Image: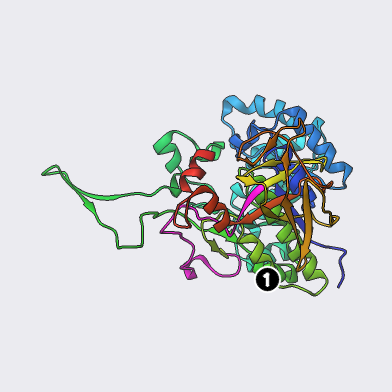
Amino acid sequence: MNNINKVELLAPAGNLEKMKIALNYGADAVYGGTSTFSLRIRSGKEFDMDSYAEGIVYAHARGKKVYSTVNSFPFNSQIKLYENHIAKIAELKPDALIVSSPGVVKVAAKIAPNIPIHLSTQANVMNAMDAEVYYDLGVERIIVAREISLKDCEAIKNHLPKLELEIFVHGSMCFAYSGRCLISALQTGRVPNRGSCANDCRFPYEIYAHNPESGTTFRLDEEEDIGTYIMNAKDMNMASHVDEILKSGVIDSLKIEGRTKSPYYAGVVTKAYRHAIDDYYVGDFDAKRYQKELNTTQNRGFTDAYLTSRPFEKNDTESKAFSIQYGTHQVAGLVGENGLTWRCKDKTCVGDSVEIVLPVGATVDLVDNDVGKIDEIAGQYWLTFKKIVSTSGKEFECIHSGDLNDIKLPTTLPGYTILRRKIDEALEKKGLTESSTPAKQEQNHK
């Protein structure tokens, strides 16, 4: 099969560590930015100009790309600030600027004429007519609305063959029309289209009937086991349709949502889609392989969204019984960039065995020494801890999540290798069960 026009895999970069992880786990490009004028203010705060510049240099040294997010909507009082910010970002030489509004498209083209402009999904492009307007303004790529169909993507590409099209294939889905929701602004004062959505659609709600004449209010009881998560959209998961998408020949980039998600998510989800893409091009596509890995991550339930079927034909896009659920696995530790040590992400004790998840293309040596043992079982690598000792010489019988000691490895592993265990084992260590919801943990994380 001809690989000349091989599709790009684009992954989220919420901070420098997650940027490096995404790149090591198979991303061709990453997207992110500082908090200024980004639609992910919270994740953007983890980047300052220096660390963001470091990330761009890191990506370029590996032949990868970085797309900078400047995709919120400015007020009149912010136009000069926008201009200054775009000029500063342009000095770092990113590979594209992601913007949302026609005005910012024109400003970006004027200030940074040598940097390609990508139009954010916030612009809600659904058809060839709107795509042409932005194309005429100088936009080189459009990240189409999540609600678009593959047939409509084909129509846009046929009309504008030189325009690049990017689609979301995985991650959180907005309850509203590509971010046009104001519930968060109403309830908490956090404005979605200014980057500070509080995810109010994920909360459980109670429903009441009020009689203004008598002042009486009744709480309405919901049907048992249905729940009250009336606006909670399931997560998009298009891995099983990657072959169909690539076969169409009209999509230039597959995008993973998730700048605020964990390093584990950044690595595992990117790797799953990397394999799906590569397997398609060699004629070995098997959706079950990718879904098995994607199911290891926390999620709100999965839906294949609207790309291959129309919204009104779907009846499985809402998760009505819970906000979020455990995946099949829990990350236990993350190996540092130098590959010599790891840090604990979940309680780990001497004698424990954890699965080793390697970056794309990486290998590991089988060893057996006083620190630990690495075995290969059925094509998968496992690390058994014989000793848990920090670089400062402190020994632990068990080490807990959040401990910042760098723990020695029995051998050098590839940087950012993930150590994980099955969820039932992880919950048992915590004294919990599968029925314990991680929703509160998610809220605390946010």
The chief SS type of the magenta part is loop
Whole-percent x and y of residue 330?
A: 61, 52
Residue closer to the observer: 408 or 235: 408
Where 250 sits versus 219, above or below? below
- The stretch in magenta equals 306-332
Farthest-out residue, left: 214
Left or right? Give the position of 208 relative to 191. left
Residue 170: quarter of image: bottom right
The reply to whether residue 245 is in sight is: yes
Whole-percent x and y of residue 274?
A: 76, 60
The residue pinned by badge 1 equals: 287
Task: Give the residue at x 16% y 44%.
Answer: 212
Left or right? Give the position of 190 relative to 60. left
Residue closer to the observer: 308 or 256: 256
| Residue type, numbered disc 1 | Ala
Farthest-out residue, front: 370
Residue 294 counted in the magenta span: no
Question: In what element is the residue under mark 1?
Answer: helix
Residue 68: quarter of image: top right
Q: Quadrant of the N terminus?
A: bottom right
- Image mark count: 1
Whole-percent x and y of residue 443?
A: 49, 41
Residue 248: quarter of image: bottom right
Task: Give the residue at x 70% y 51%.
Answer: 419
The reply to whether residue 135 is in sight is: no
Colour setup of the view:
rainbow
Whole-percent x and y of residue 311?
A: 51, 65
Where 346 sits versus 354, above or below? above
Q: Residues within 10 Å of mark 1 (few under 14, many from 20)?
A: some
Where 366 sits versus 390, above or below? below
